[in-house]
Image (cartoon, rainbow, N blue to C red):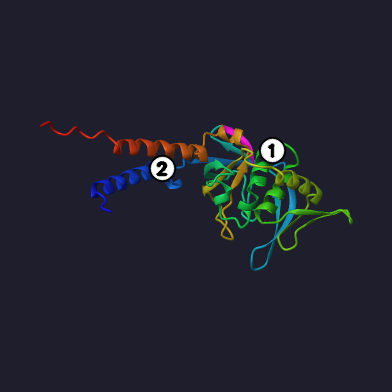
Amino acid sequence: MKVSTRILMGNYVRAALSLALLAAAHPSPAAKGLATSPITFLNASGSTNVTVTYFNGDRFVSEATAAGSYWISDSGATYNAFCTDPFDSIYNGESWSVTKAPTSSALGLSSATYPYGPYNISAIDYIGQYYTTGGSQAAAQIAVWDLVLGGHVSYDAAAGNYFYDAGKFTALGVSAKDVYEVEQKALQSKGSSGSVFLKQVNGSQPSQFGRPQDLVTHGEFSNAGKIAAVPEPSAPQMALCLALGMGIVWGIGRRKKPAPPAG
């Protein structure tokens, strides 16, 4: 069967234009040009002294640190936030440049270089949204570290004991029962809770163990800091954009042919 070269070329052009419209509707993160904003760590005065231990792949690493939320200044706004890595230090008065994205999005914690964070993203999202404004913030901070590093607290009903998963992460100084209760509420959450992930672009502390030190916080409060969040189109929005684009492009390709000359 003979197919017109003109028809084939028209199909190729329409397909290419359709793909271009789809790409424009969902640009890459780099093309989105995420805005940055400076934040300053004011204090962590409500924190609890703890000792945490984690197996980093070669050996167990233990460190005395403080568990709780950080009080942060951001473009005139102030709010609490939890850090995501217990082994990268933060000091009072330190300033960072950060980008912001919903914690549950591809630009949030799920894209960071944490070994297990993406698997527990809904739980970490829940903690960032609901425990930076109240509750046991020391237990919530421990829960974030535990979940990011791939562990969780279990309960042995027969013995009445709460314990951390062996070989993952442990913490002394905060009740394991309190951490368990935070984690259980968080692990039962579904979908996005609305928290925001603040990703460190630069700061005075270097990344350790191949992981950056980043933050998770309440979405409403961090929005006051005017760090430009980048909304990502939903699946229905993507489908609508593609359908409209296909319709427009194919409509262009189906213009009315000119009438043949008379005679």
On the image, the x and y values in percent for residue 245 come to 39, 38
153 part of magenta stretch: no
Q: Which of label 2 and label 1 is nearer to you?
A: 2
The residue tagged with tag 2: helix, strand or loop? helix
Work out which quarter of the rendered image holds the C terminus and state it.
top left
Report the front residue among 45 and 234.
234
Q: Residue furthest bottom?
A: 58
Q: CA distance from mark 2 to mark 1?
A: 36 Å
On the image, the x and y values in percent for residue 20 come to 36, 44
Tag of residue 130: 1
Q: Which residues are magenta?
A: 77-81
Number of residues whose C-alpha sits closer than 10 Å to that of mark 2, classed few (under 14), some (14–19) or many (20 or more): many
Q: Residue at x 16, y 34 (%)?
A: 260
> For the stretch drawn in magenta, what is the main secondary structure?
strand
Residue 229 visible here: no
Query: On the rendered structure, is 151 left or right of 97?
Result: right
Q: Which residue is mark 2?
A: 22
Query: On the rendered structure, is 255 left or right of 174?
Result: left
Asked if the residue under mark 1 is in contact with the one under mark 2, i.e. CB atoms within 8 Å, the reply is: no
Report the front residue among 156 and 145.
156
On the image, the x and y values in percent for residue 71 come to 64, 39
Query: On the rendered structure, is 1 left or right of 137?
Result: left
Work out which quarter of the rendered image holds the N terminus and state it.
bottom left
Quadrant in the rendering for residue 137: top right
Query: Three-letter amino acid code at disc 1?
Result: Tyr
Query: Three-letter amino acid code at disc 2?
Result: Leu
Of callouts 2 and 1, the N-terminal one: 2
Q: Residue at x 68, y 49 (%)?
A: 144
Report the front residue among 121 and 137.
121
